[in-house]
Image (cartoon, helix red, strand yellow):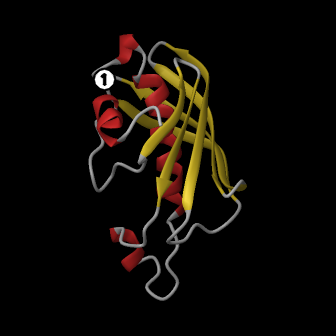
Amino acid sequence: MILDKDGIKAILPHREPFLLIDEVTELIDGKSATAKWTLTGNEYFFKGHFPDTPVLPGVLMLESIAQCGAVVILGLPENRGKIAFFAGADNVKFKRKVVPGDTLELHCELIKSRFGMAIAQGTATVNGELACSAEIKCMVQ
């Protein structure tokens, strides 16, 4: 493990219940990050999505990918203490359900960063099986 929750909180402004990554397992400065998020089933959203068939909402899976990307961007010395605001997502594809007990492995690779705008390609997998992929965009302020 490269970063635990405290290390992640030193970079990201997110806090529970909206910090959606538990640990960063690989970080290549300014290039990419790999992170994990283990879903216990006790998370607040499973109570209503859906009560008899709990499934991780796709938008939260997308947000977890964005947070992994934000670790790459906000980890750069020139961006420390700043906030990365989600600016968009393209080519989003959901490939499988994510349920309580699953661990998402998130990977984000920075494609471009200029003038406060960053673009990254991200994936979320469970046991090596693709759950979601997307190109994410954010503004750093």
What residue do we see at 50% from left, 65% from top?
A: 57
**Label 1 Cα crowd, 10 Å radius (few <14 / some 14-19 / many 20+):** some
Does 97 appear above or below 129? below
Residue 44 x %, y %? 33, 70
Residue 45 x %, y %? 38, 70
Q: Is residue 111 left or right of residue 54?
A: right
Q: Which residue is mark 1?
A: 82
What residue do we see at 53% from left, 18% from top?
A: 30
Viewer-proximal residue among 105 and 59: 105
Residue 42 x %, y %? 36, 72
Does 40 appear above or below 92? below
What residue do we see at 43% from left, 68% from top?
A: 40
How many numbered marks appear? 1
Viewer-proximal residue among 34 and 67: 34
**Residue type, label 1:** Lys
Viewer-proximal residue among 62 and 109: 109
Residue 27 x %, y %? 53, 27
What residue do we see at 47% from left, 58% from top?
A: 38
Q: Helix or strand or loop: what does disc 1 sit on?
A: loop
Does 139 appear above or below 35? above
Q: Is residue 8 left or right of residue 124?
A: left
Does 117 appear above or below 105? above
State the residue lying farthest toward the front: 1
Q: Quadrant of the C terminus?
A: top left
